[in-house]
């Protein structure tokens, strides 16, 4: 099954996904910098991650409307 979408939309989604992945990697590296990751750091990262994902979803919706 193929998804019918134009190249601009697909490229926009790829950029959004790469941005979220880069944020996650940067956040992981910052948490692991001291050699251990605490539960508090994980909870904070998840809470921040929810906001990042929600923003990415909104961006994807706006991109689709264009």
Image (spheres, rainbow, N blue to C red):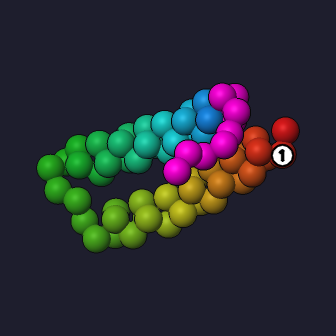
Q: Can the viewer see residue 57?
A: yes
Q: Position of residue 37 (x, y in %)?
A: 23, 59
From the image, tell me which residue sits under label 1.
65
Q: At 69% across and 28% down in the image, what residue appears? A: 8
Task: Judge from the rendering whether residue 13 lies leftward or rightward of residue 29; answer left or right.
Answer: right
Where residue 62 sits: x, y (%)? 79, 46
Decide whether residue 52 is among the magenta residues.
no
Q: Alpha-carbon neighbours of circle 1 within 10 Å: few (<14), some, or many (≥20)?
A: few
- What residue is drawn where x is 34% and y is 63%? 41
In-image side of 23 versus 52 (left or right): left
Q: Position of residue 54 (x, y in %)?
A: 63, 59
Residue 10 lies in quadrant: top right
Along the viewing direction, whichever of 64 and 2 lies nearer the viewer: 2
Q: Position of residue 65 (x, y in %)?
A: 84, 46
Dividing the picture into quarters, in which one does residue 46 lie? Answer: bottom left
Which is the main secondary structure of the residues drawn in magenta?
Answer: loop
Left-right relation of 15 to 41: right
Mark 1 element type: helix
- Give the residue drawn at x 55%, y 36%: 14
Residue under the point 84% across and 38% down: 66
For the magenta stretch, what is the residue range? 1-9
């Amino acid at each position: 099954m193929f998804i019918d979408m134009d190249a601009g939309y697909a490229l926009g989604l790829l950029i959004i996904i790469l941005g979220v992945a880069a944020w996650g990697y940067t956040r992981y590296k910052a948490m692991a910098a001291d050699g251990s990751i605490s539960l508090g750091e994980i909870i904070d990262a998840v809470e921040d991650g929810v906001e990042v994902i929600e923003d990415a979803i909104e961006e994807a919706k706006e991109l689709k409307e264009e």
